[in-house]
Amino acid sequence: MTSKTLANGILRAVGIITGICLLGYFLYQIQAVIVYLVVALITTLIGLPILNFFQRKLKFNNIFATIATVFIFVLILAGFIMMFIPLISSQGESLSLLQTTKIEQNITELLSKIGIWLESHNIDSKNLMKEANIGSKINFSFIPNFLNILLGTIGSFGVGLASVLFITFFFLKDRMLFVRGAKKLIPDSHEEQILNSLDKINHLLTRYFVGLLLQLLIIFVLYLIVLLIFGIQNALVIAFLCAVLNIIPYIGPLIGSLLAAVLTMISNLGSDFQTEILPTTIYVMIGFWIVQVIDNNVSSPMIFSNSVNSHPLEIFLVILIAGSLFGILGMIIAVPMYTILKVIGKEFFPENRVVQMLTKDL
């Protein structure tokens, strides 16, 4: 190996590393755009069945079907905004969403009530609190920072929403144009396999995201029924927040239950802890647990098994492994990514026995 060859190899390696670094920096700088594209893609997959309905059943042409589909998304968003903003504005004081001092006072009062209840059952609450060192562990200084981030997010929400709707419109309208453009970039030797994979992935992911929305709607309705039965204030908001947290498999329902318990206790601070607050909170938790039993054993297996053609145990293991490797984000994207890998495996490695076993229902 000559010195010239070695120098060229070093320069090529440096050039490749530099290019990768520049690409990474560029992607980091446009991360908001990437998020918009991903959200728009998910919205497009959810909107495809609606678009097909307008085209096939109502005989709309492509442009009017696209406009009608996007208009439905706008109506749904407007409905949520009109439903939740007045509710939060009018009842924000009772929820203490924007008053950090009130939050601290409410939690302190709640801890005091719990301490009195423990004392009534001959449990030394002072020593218990001292050993647990709860006072030093609860730090409310994060709340102003969180609210600043939240307000900043709300401020940029309008731009993001407009961008997502704009991108979604063209994803729906010109989807065939994108397919034709992709065909020109695909090598002829693998064109059929890649196009078949893309078609199956599109079909399965559309069913998955529609199924996810259906699951969240079912959970939201069941949570709302539980909260209304026990007369919890702001039941609509609490049920919505807890239902959205179910997007995170297994961990989300636990966080939602804890959130519901805290808000239930805070909303009843004027009542007696032993006779009102504690029993009501326990009943709400039992209700949420029943909802999760229904979801885990009935709705989720039926919806997701049918939408992505995978066994419930298979989905459980995939989510568990993805969560162990990549945390919460891995749990959220586990099923879509696994579905994509299954489709690719079936198209490109159909003779592999493991692939055959995993993709027999695709």
Image (cartoon, rainbow, N blue to C red):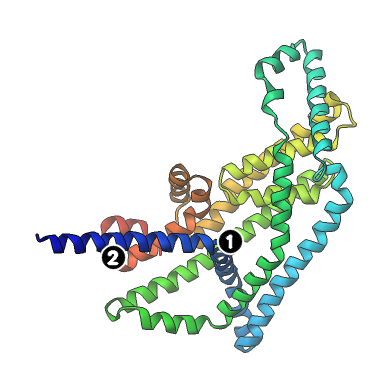
- Dot 2, how many residues are within 10 Å of its Cα: few (below 14), some (14-19), or many (20+)? few
Q: Position of residue 42 (x, y in %)?
A: 56, 66
Q: Secondary structure at mark 1?
A: helix
In the figure, is residue 200 to the left or right of 158?
Answer: left
Q: Position of residue 33 (x, y in %)?
A: 56, 66
Q: Is residue 57 visible?
A: no
- Dot 1, how many residues are within 10 Å of its Cα: few (below 14), some (14-19), or many (20+)? many
Give the amino acid at mark 1: Gly
Residue visible at 36% across and 61% down in the picture: 18
Residue visible at 68% across and 40% down in the picture: 257
Residue visible at 73% across and 40% down in the picture: 143
Query: Where is residue 199, by image quadrant?
Result: bottom left
Determine whether 327 is above or below 139 in the image.
Answer: below
- Residue that numbered label 1 is attached to: 211
Q: Is residue 157 visible?
A: yes
- Residue that numbered label 2 is attached to: 350
Q: Are marks 1 and 2 in contact (CB under 8 Å)?
A: no
